[in-house]
Each structure stands twice: as C-alpha cells, then as structure tokens.
Image (spheres, helix red, strand yellow):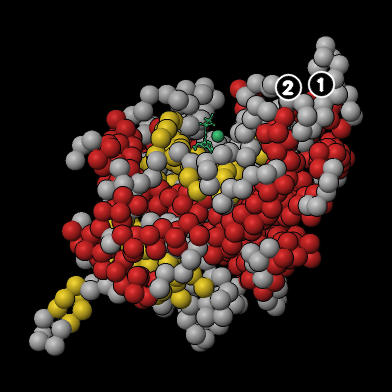
Amino acid sequence: MNKVSEMFGSKVFNIAVMKERLPKDVYKAVQNTVKNGKRLDSNVADVVANSMKDWAIENGATHFTHWFQPMTGVTAEKHDSFISPTDDGHIIMEFKGKELVQGEPDASSFPSGGLRATFEARGYTAWDPTSFAFIKGKTLCIPTAFCSYGGEALDKKTPLLRSMEAINRQALRVLKLFGNDAASVKTTVGPEQEYFLVDKDMYDKRPDLLYTGRTLFGAKPPKGQELDDHYFGTIKSRVAAFMNELNEELWKLGILAKTEHNEVAPAQHELAPIFATTNIATDHNQLTMELMQRIAKKHNMVCLLHEKPFAGVNGSGKHNNWSISTSDGVNLLEPGETPHENAQFLLFLCAVIKAVDDYQDLLRISVASAGNDHRLGANEAPPAVVSMFLGDELTEILESIVSDSSYDSKERVQMKIGVHVLPRFAKDTTDRNRTSPFAFTGNKFEFRMLGSSASVSGANIVLNTAVAESLKQFADELEGREDFNDALHELIKRVIKEHKRIIFNGNGYDDAWIAEAEKRGLLNLKSTPDCLPYYILEKNEKLFSEHKVLSPSELNARYEIKLETYSKTLNIEALTMVDMVNKDILPAIAEFINTLSQGVNNKKAAVPGAECKYEEKVISKLSALAALICDKCEALDKALCALPDGDDALKTAVYYKDVVFDAMNALRESVDEAEVITDRKYWPYPGYGELLFGVR
Ligand code: ADP
Ligand code: MG
C-alpha cells in the first residue's frame, strides 16, 4: 500500500466502509445519528458493532477500547479483547451493540474535581458517533465521551459537544433571519502543532526531561536561534524519516496532515493538518500528539510537547484556526460578494468581536497552564492580554460604519448594511501580524495563545459558547423586527462601538501596548493562578449554564482541577530540582573541585611555584557557587515544606507561583553559572548544545 490515496483512512471505520458493509437501513440509521444526533436503537447498534468488529479483525485488531479524554489532558483507554467463551470450551470473537454504545471504565482515579468521590458509582463512556472509530495497533478505538452516572461531564469532549450544540442552536436562529435555512451549523478547527525532537539517548540522561518534560537547568549554548537559520531550513534526514512515517500513520487514521516545516528554535518543528469539524479536529490533534511521541521513539528521538522545554529559545504553541460553517459547507466568516452576504458576514464577525471582548478572561483561562505561563508575554508568543487583530482595512471599514462616514472617500456613499457592497479588502495583508493573540485571517480566526501540549477542546469550548451567547443576544434583538435592515445596521454599529477596545492591530510584543491595554480596561492576567479566579465569576457560570455547556458544579470541578494541576506540576518540578542538585550536580561539582585541587597539589609538588591560576580561579569560583547552590536548594526544600495550611487550592497555587517558583529560578541561576565553568566530562547531563544541536 504505497499510494497515499489508498492509505488514507485505511484504518478508519468511515462513511465509505459503513456504506460498503452495513445493510442499507442500518447505514441510514447511523447517518441519521451522525447528522441529527438521533439515538441508535439497540438492534441497529448490534449490527453496527458486529460489522465494526469484523472489519477490525480483518485489519489485525484483537481488542477494542472506548477511547476518551479525561481531564488529565491526555487520552485514556482500557483494552478488552473481542474474545467471548462458548459452552463447549471454545471462544468466539464478539462485540455487542451495548459494548459499542456504552462502556464502564474503572475510572475512579481520573481527576473529577470532587464531582465523583472514588467510592461512588463509576463513570461511563458513551460513543460519539460523529467521530469515526479507528484502529491503533491491535485495538479498535471507539471515540467516546466520559460522564459520571449523574450525567456530569468528567472529560474534555462532553462540554465540547455541548458547546457545538449551543452555537448550532443560536447560529441557526440568526441564519433564519437572513432567509438561510441551513440544516445545521458547525465550527471548524485546524490546529497547527509545534514540537521539539531531541535524541533519545540524551533525553534519557536528563531526569528533568524525564519527570517534567522540560529542562529545569541548562546554561545557554554559544548559539541559540539568533540567526534564524533553522526556520524553514532543510530538514535533517532522521527528522525527515520521522516525518514521513508520522504522515503515513496519520493518513491511515484519516488525519489530514498537510504541511510541516522547521520552526524558529533549533530542533523545533511544526505540523499543520487541514481543518475539520471541531470535535473531530480535537480527537485528531490528540492522536497526532500521541503518534508524534510514539513514532519519534522508533527513530531514537523523543518528541517534546512541553510549552517551554528550553530556556532562551522559543517554546512551542498551538494555533487554533477556527471558523463557523453551515451544513452546506458555507463558511460564515467569508465576507462574500453581495450586500446580503456582507451583512451576514458582518453580523457573525461582530458576534466574535463581542464574544472575545466579553469573555477575554475565559479565553485566557482556556490556555492557562504552568507550561504556557513561560511563553505568554515573553516575546515569543502573544501577551497574556487578549486582543483581536482585524487588519487596518477591515478596521477602517468598521469605523466608517460606526461614524456613518464613507470608507472610500472617492465614492462618498455611506455604507448601509444590507444595501451596499463591502469595499474589498485584501486577505493577504490580514495575516502579517504574528503578535496578536486572536487574528482574523481573511475567512477564519487564528487563536494563537494555546500551549503545545494542551488539548484544543478547552479553547474551543469557550469560543463556541461565547459566540453562541453573542448570537443569542443578536437573535433576541432582531427576531420579529419588520425593519430588519435598519435594526441590523444599528445593532452592528452599537456592537462595534461597545467592543472596539478589543481590536488592536499593532505590535502585541511592545510594552507600550500593555500600557495602552490597561488604559482600555483590558485584562492582563499574567499567570495561571492570576486568571483562574475569573473562571467561576457569576457571569461565566451563567454563560456556561445557560447554554447547557457546564453546570455550576462541573465548572467548579474544572476550576479545582486546573488549580491542582498547576500546583502539582510545580511541586514535581521543584522536587526534581532538589533531587538533581543533591544527587548529581553538587557531587559532580565537588568531584571536579577535588580533581582540580589534587592537580594543584601535584603540580606544586612537581614544580614548586608553578602557576595554578586557572585551577585556583575555578576552585574558588565553583566552591562559592556550590555553597550558594547548597543554600538555595535548602531554601527550595524549605519552601516546599512550608505550604499554606488548609485545602484552599487557590491559596496553594498562588504560593507555588510566588514562593516556590522564585526559589526554583534562583537555584537554576547558580547551577547554570556553575555549568559554564565546569569541565564537560564532569557535568552529569548533556547540555543545551548537545540537546539542541548535537554538539558535544
Ligand atoms: P497559513 O496560516 O500558514 O497561511 P492557512 O491559511 O492555509 O495557512 O491555514 C492554516 C490552518 O488553518 C490550516 O490548518 C488550515 O486547515 C486551517 N483553516 C483553513 N480554513 C479554515 C477554516 N475555515 N476553519 C478552520 N480552520 C481553517
Ligand atoms: Mg498560524
């Protein structure tokens, strides 16, 4: 199987396979479920399950699993074989409809944020028929949502599906006003994924990479990314072999891996797929990250998905390209050619502008993690302030609508929405600003604040729900208005006027912008503990519960989990540092000092009065640093022992940020200083030069 077209989707139980294998009426019933969310009845489910099993076995599978996305951020699966015993002591391969539709993983150890005490009933998984089953290794994987028996979401998929329903509901109301009777509206996502590849032998020698996914120590090598010679550079052969295999495996799973190139930092790369419906794109991105890690190992490399594996060079992010389209495939963020299309476009554009302004806090929270805190605002990723880039031309058009003045001074006509055609604006110029957190790129938005390791579901849950809320308010206002065009014109004018503070087309990395943003009243929530308290504000609780995306208790659970994950991450990092310093770094420095000292003694015995400048200088410098490292390590250890009392998760997280993190940075500084003057042979770990450039 060499041809890409043959390979593509060969491990997916997709429409083509269903059409070929299922009886016509069963196929129709499944389609009805996929398109309209109709429940499959159990007879139909049995037929589908059996056919799925036969197909999976023919393709080498022996097991099946309900594949789900718990709140750990990675995917989970528990494998069961198809084997079923018969009365006569033999076995048959069996897979029943109810096993397809619902599963019961023993999931008591997954984080639930208090939603499900470990002693209570287990959660269950439910098939998401809109995302196709696929084969991974020898296992048939069934994409599922994961809930408690009370129906509370315990995963990242359930609220995502709910948010898609919310935006579908509200967008259809708005489309109806324009005489558009589309059957459904879906959001689409194309996530661009950044990652690092490092040699596995070197990776294995670094406890920090092994335990935390990032280097906690490491002096800067003589060369970093300053020459920009890695960006789009030729791809090394080992990396190329990895990329080829990755592409093939992704294609087999029906994932539209499209572009790949080297990124800015050395050893950094990017992969972008062609966009898909949001829940499928989310599943695919999870699979992509998983395959990247598995396939890298086959090439004796490790794929680092951490947001900041190395200090001093860029970290990794994920760009979430997002749009809304109808079941007929019409992109609602495409400006269109006629006054009618333009008016509809402007209303959807305004829905996004209003959503981003009203829910800046939630967007910021959706990308918050200990790892991403290293990037946001550090001049390698957008600042922590959420703003929107529309491009000068589109912004000018909006301004002319607000001020009732003409956009093109030559024409001298006032733009009347629904009557006049929007002046053309060049698409290409809209994508040049790379510093904006949220950029309009001609027919979609690119949300650029996401971290590389996170699931894209969080960001899209917020986007879908916040835009659904804007659309709801618009529909409430416009429905039943006889003078639709006038009402629309006034509404658009008002929304732009009220929310134009969120639009910023300048350089987001500039300090002046941060000052300006503050003047405009925009939020600047620098760290995860800074932003998380906003999660449970009443306005946000109301948003999620009114659109039936997250109940107040589900929201609160997520708030707790995010805080706990932050604190746990920093705790592991701090403990790893202490461990590395005590067991490897200080002993290595002591050994080197000892060797130098013996050398001095030997030298002086052999040639009395011989010059020992180098040795003496390094001995005293390193001795002083070792003392400092020893003190700072003890201080870090003490900080970890002095956690605030009680179980206030926010207080604990703030303590980790303010006290522990500072102690970690102080310790690193001295260790990195020592690394620079220590003989390579004595330093216990491969350094940045080796990890990033393979130089020793
Ligand atoms: P670039 O940002 O490099 O110019 P593209 O504009 O082609 O590249 O798109 C970048 C990403 O945006 C790709 O993953 C692409 O599939 C995705 N994308 C394009 N159109 C849409 C859309 N309507 N909805 C969601 N994602 C989209
Ligand atoms: Mg991009």
Question: Is residue 291 placed above or below 551 in the rendered structure?
Answer: above
Residue that appears at 83% across and 11% down: 410
SS for callout 2? loop
Q: Position of residue 446 (x, y in %)?
A: 61, 38
Residue 393, given in percent of the width and then of the height, sits at 74, 23
Residue drawn 58% across the image and 48% down it = 182
Give the quarter of the figure containing the C terminus.
top left
- Between residues 435 and 511, which one lies in front from this camera angle? 435
The circle drawn on residue 285 is: none
Confirm or deny contact between disc 1 and disc 2 (CB under 8 A).
Answer: yes
| Residue 407: assigned label | 1
Residue type at the position of mark 2 = Pro
Where residue 561 sits, quadrant-wise, is: bottom right
The residue closer to the viewer here, 481 or 652, is: 481
Viewed as shown, does residue 209 lie left or right of 549? left
Residue positioned 55% across, 60% down in the render: 161
